[in-house]
Structure formats: structure tokens, C-alpha cells
Image: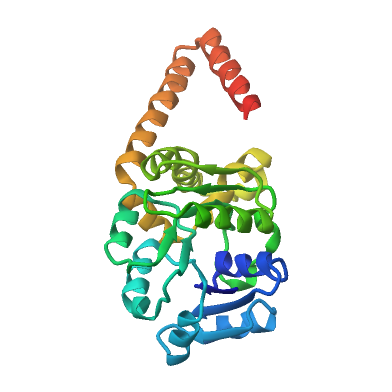
Amino acid sequence: MVITIIGLGVIGGSYGLALKGKIYGAEINGIDISEETLKKANEMGIVRRSAIYGSEESYNIISESDLLIVCLYPKKIKEFIQCYKKSFKDGLLITDTTGIKGNFINNILSELPKGVDFVFTHPMAGREKKGIEYASRKVFIGANFIITPIIINKEENIEKIKEIAKTMGFGKISMVNPYEHDKIISFTSQLPHAIAVSLINSDNYNMETGVFIGDSYRDLTRIANINEELWSELFIDNKENLIMAIENFQDELNKVKAAIKNENVDELKEFFVKSTERREKL
């Protein structure tokens, strides 16, 4: 089995490390736009063959691949397929790692050649840093893995992706409609990032804040260390769902604000009890 990872950043590199030596007889290759990244991937022993995106060798690698793991930003994936689709062999399986699915899937399907199956997935794991030097096989251990199947997917290919996810160490593997995925992710992933960014940017004290922080501030703002290119794209492409999530959050925050303003201790206690019960259920 020939597996080729497209985009050897922190996620693509982590995929390579997590798969290395785990699938008997598999050859893992890599394609990236950066020569330095490819050099590091070879030094780390992640890939057997590698090539610069768009090079003649990259087309050769693609043409021999049985599985493509595309670790690119959403808009770049369509460009990738347009660039390489004439090199896809019949029966090729493609999967992705993107954090949005609905409209993105429709754009991909319009470019996908016949005989190629694209099983869309979302590994719910990552790191704040970007670049292959921050790749780690440990990042996926016990993490959630979401598959958003579409009607044209072959059952055997969905099962193959499930097995690969298990091999990499993922914990719970779920399947959900692409549009339901985007609605849920706007709340569980994108809203927390928006809150973290807003929280750390609201620091107007102009003092050495770091001296005064504890675990609460540290934990809440960890994901404020954010990849601006990727997350700008994710926020905009899922804006309807995310705006609704932000507005619902604002409503709840306003309730807490009003209770504080009115010195309503009983109401505050109700909020705290409710949040504690919900958090423990998670």
C-alpha cells in the first residue's frame, strides 16, 4: 500500500509519525511546497520518498499512490485536485483533515474524477504551533476522530479509514452528516478559539499580566496561540453557524453579567451548579 501525505506541516507530519511502521508493507511518501520541510521529514524518517509540490516527481508519486492524506487548508485542497487529478489512478482513496465540511465538500466533489473515492474526516486533535518540527505521534492518542460520509462513499473505504484511525491511536470514532458536523464544530471548536482570542485581546491593564495568571487564565488562553491563516478561513467558511454560537454565548454571558450587576447571589449559584453538572457529564 502506497500512502502519500500532501502537506507535511504539524498535522501531516504527525500523521506520518503515527502511521510509521503501523501498517504492514506500507510505503509512506510526502509532498510539500517547502524543501526545508521535506528535508526534515526525511531526517525524521517519516517518508520514504518525497517531492516538491508541482514537480515531475510529485506527479510520479501521486500516480503510484493508493491513499492520499491531504493535510492542506480547505481552499488549497480544490487547487490540489485540479492540479493532480489526471495522475489519480482508478480506485484511489483520498481523505482529509479539514475542520469544515458542508460547502467545502460540494466544491471538492465538482472536481473529483470518476473512480476516486474521497472519505472526508476531521481528526479532533492538533497543536498551537505550526511546522513539521512540532509534529508528534502522541497528539492523536485517545483523541476523537470524525467521519462525515457522503452517499457516494464505498463502505469498504469508510471501514479502511476507520481502521487507519484506530491504528494511529484515536479513541472514539464517530460518523455524522457534514452539515451537522459544521454546526457542532462551530460550538465545540471554533467558539472556544474565538473566546480565547477575545479574552487575551481584552487585556487593557497595560501591566505584566503574566505575573498574576493561574491555571484558569493559562488554560482558557492556550488556544489563543493560533494559526491566523487557517483559522480565518475556517471562521469565514462556517460563519452562519459560528455567529449563532457566538450570539448564544453572549446571551449566557449577559445573564451572568446581569446577575452580578443586580447582586443576585441565588441566580449566580444556579448558573454555577448548572455548569458544574454539565461539565461533569463530559
Depth order, front residue of 211/183: 183
Which image quarter holds the C terminus?
top right
Q: Residue furthest bottom?
A: 56
Q: Position of residue 280 (x, y in %)?
A: 65, 25
Rendered view: 26 above or below 55: above
Left/right of residue 150 with respect to residue 225 in the rendered view: left
| Residue drawn at x 38%, y 51% as measured from the top left | 101
Q: How many marks?
A: 0
Q: How is the image coloured?
A: rainbow
Which image quarter holds the N terminus?
bottom right
Q: Is residue 33 visible?
A: no
| Residue drawn at x 42%, y 62% as measured from the top left | 117
| Residue drawn at x 66%, y 46% as measured from the top left | 171
Q: Is residue 255 visible?
A: yes
Q: Residue furthest top?
A: 266
Q: Residue furthest left?
A: 110
Depth order, front residue of 18/209: 18
Q: Position of residue 209 (x, y in %)?
A: 59, 47
| Residue drawn at x 48%, y 46% as measured from the top left | 193
Residue 265 found in image quarter? top right
Depth order, front residue of 250/109: 109
Q: Position of residue 49 (x, y in %)?
A: 59, 85
